[in-house]
Amino acid sequence: ERILGDSDFVEKVLSQASEQMERRYRLKAEGWTLTKITERVAEIFGIEKDQVVVSGKQPDRVRARSVLASWATRDLGLTATEVGKYLGLSKSAVSRAATRGQKLIVDQFLSLRE
């Protein structure tokens, strides 16, 4: 594929893509999976890990699933379809949850790693 733009822009885009791929491979090499992310999210929100994946509108569960969706799609590189099957959500619901989750991650300074 081609990236259109001046050379500085192209280099910046390629550098960001490379960094993201390296992070995904590093996380997978460290053994990060949906299950491990679920355990981390449960720890952060102080709920049982099975409560993270159970549907419901309780605020803690919604926030936990949102953070899980964000880390799984953005950091681990899983598709919204894969995450949706795990959480029992549609692709579009996973996408919206990941956006909410990213905001929570930034606002509350959450980290996937301890």
Image: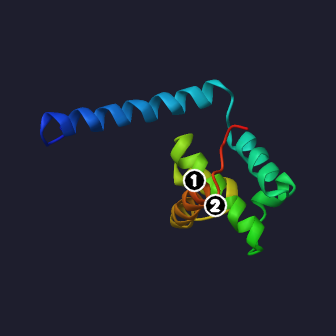
Residue denoted by label 2: 66
Q: Tell me the CA gap for discs 2 and 1.
A: 6 Å
- Residue 90 - label: none
Q: Considering the numbered disc 1 on the image, is that residue within a helix, a strand or a loop?
A: helix
Q: Which residue sits at x=76%, y=45%?
A: 40
Q: Which residue sits at x=60%, y=47%?
A: 72
Q: Please state the horizontal and vertical placement of residue 39, each as a whole percent of the image.
A: 79, 45
Residue denoted by label 1: 70
Amino acid under disc 2: Ser
Q: Is residue 32 left or right of residue 96?
A: right
Q: Residues within 10 Å of mark 1 (few under 14, many from 20)?
A: many
Amino acid under disc 1: Ser
Q: Is residue 65 left or right of residue 81?
A: right
Q: Please state the horizontal and vertical placement of residue 90, each as a whole percent of the image.
A: 57, 65
Looking at the image, how many numbered discs can be counted on the residues? 2
Image quarter of residue 65 = bottom right
Image quarter of residue 48 = bottom right
